[in-house]
Amino acid sequence: MKRKDFIKNCGFACLGGLGISTLLESCSSLQILSGEISDDDLVVPISDFIIKSNKKQFKRYIIVTNDLLKFPMCIYRFNENTYSALWMECTHLGAELQVFGDKLQCPAHGSEFNNKGIMQNGPADTNLRTFAIVIETNQLKISLKAI
């Protein structure tokens, strides 16, 4: 192998390694969190939205589970006082939804919903279940009465 080709290949390998490490680092910020159920509410600390950094940045959404819930919830943060809690069950045939940024998508048949639970593309023909949220002492209290 010529020296020029060797340096070129090594350069591409280094760039590829750097790209993969950046991708893996971005995936590590998404984690499925466990929420506590108290009375009829799923309780989630607002601090779960904070990204660990010097600047005060927030995650757009988090996914919260609890052993008593059949499906997880996706909670979107729009600003410090506005959140939406979405039941991650497709309204078409009941598959668990996957989150892709500001949309939720059904892996079974491709239905899509926006970050407020409104159906965007079928075959689902109804919106996602949403839940009332009260902000109290740096916690979100998501009412489970609708479940």
Image (tube, rainbow, N blue to C red):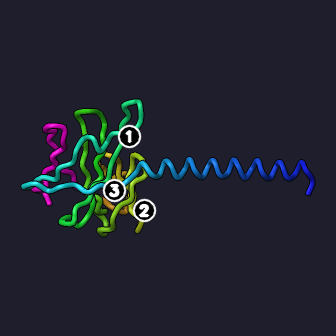
Magenta stretch?
Answer: 128-147
x%, y% of residue 36?
18, 55
Q: Of marks 1 and 2, which one's residue comes earlier in the chain?
A: 1
| Quarter of the image where one finds residue 134 | top left
Identify residue type, mark 3. Ile
Which residue is located at x 27 percent, y 60 percent? 72
69 is higher (above) or lower (below) than 17: below
| Residue 110 - label | 2
Q: Is residue 67 left or right of residue 9?
A: left
Identify residue type, mark 2. Gly
Which structural element holds mark 2?
Answer: loop
Which residue is located at x 19 percent, y 43 percent? 140
Mark 2–mark 3 Cα distance, whole angstroms, equals 22 Å
Residue identifier under label 1: 51
- In the rendered image, residue 143 lying in the magenta stretch gets the answer yes
x%, y% of residue 56?
36, 31
Residue mark closest to the camera, 1 vs 2: 1
Q: Is residue 43 left or right of residue 121?
A: left
Q: Of marks 2 and 3, which one's residue comes earlier in the chain?
A: 3
| Quarter of the image where one finds residue 32 | bottom left
| Residue 3 - label | none
Nearer-the-camera pick, 117 or 74: 74
